[in-house]
Amino acid sequence: MYPFSEEDLEELYGRAVQRDQRLADILLVDAWTGLRWSELRAVRVRDFIEVPLPVLVVQRAEPEGVEVKGTKSGRSRRVPVADRVLPLVRSLTAGREADDLLCVTTSGHQLHASAFKRTLTWATIADGRRIHDLRHTAACLWLARGVDPVTVQAWMGHASIATTNLYLHHLGTAADRAGLDRLNRRGHTGGTRSVLESE
């Protein structure tokens, strides 16, 4: 697992935009929604719902070279569309029919990983990461912003909370962050200071 930090993700997006605006937008959408590549390839315009809140309904996957099938868990799920990528998802739906694929190339073709990576010069711009690390990035963004792990589990489509907890080990928990903030706070912290000063 090698997720992008939010800052690194924005830098990646900036580099990708210079190569292909639409694919850059799709990259960012993937990093904020956590869809598997096969799910991203299969999501339809009708799967984007804005009321009562903007979500993508993930109910199918289309691995390259394989027919459309159900998701890995066999269940559909709803993944929120954050404000950062909501305008991008709206633009991907503009002028499109409900049954059209949501994420397609500028020429309207279905996504293929090799062409996606070639067009964006992925090996050059992604700092050693895989496309799948965009999915990891989403989970880390959500957890870092305080989304409950059980909610993240549902959004990611993880069968087990243990899988979701791997991201917590990578990021640290809220308790870890609070503890570090306490350690980094200036001021007298007890008897340790006087011992150090006397040495």
Image (cartoon, rainbow, N blue to C red):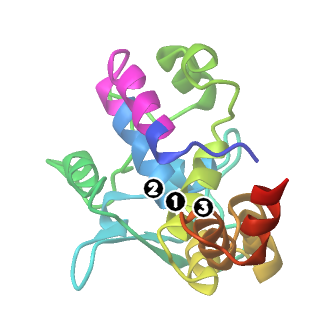
Where is residue 145 shown, x and y percent of the image?
Answer: 47, 68
Residue found farthest to the left: 95
Res 16 → quadrant = top left
Mark 1: amino acid: Leu
| Residue at position x 48%, y 16% in the image | 119
Identify the residue under disc 3. 184
Can you identify the residue that label 1 sits on? 141
- Magenta range: 8-22
Q: Are marks 2 and 3 in contact (CB under 8 Å)?
A: no
Residue 177: x percent and y percent? 62, 69
Residue 32's mark?
2
In which quarter of the view is residue 97 placed?
bottom left
CA separation in Å, label 1 and label 3: 23 Å
Can you give x and y, in whole percent of width and height, for residue 50 in the image?
A: 23, 74
Q: Which class describes the residues within 10 Å of circle 3: few (<14), some (14-19), or many (20+)?
A: few
Question: Disc 2 marks which amino acid?
Answer: Trp
Is 97 in front, or is 160?
160
Residue at x 80% of width, y 58% of height: 198
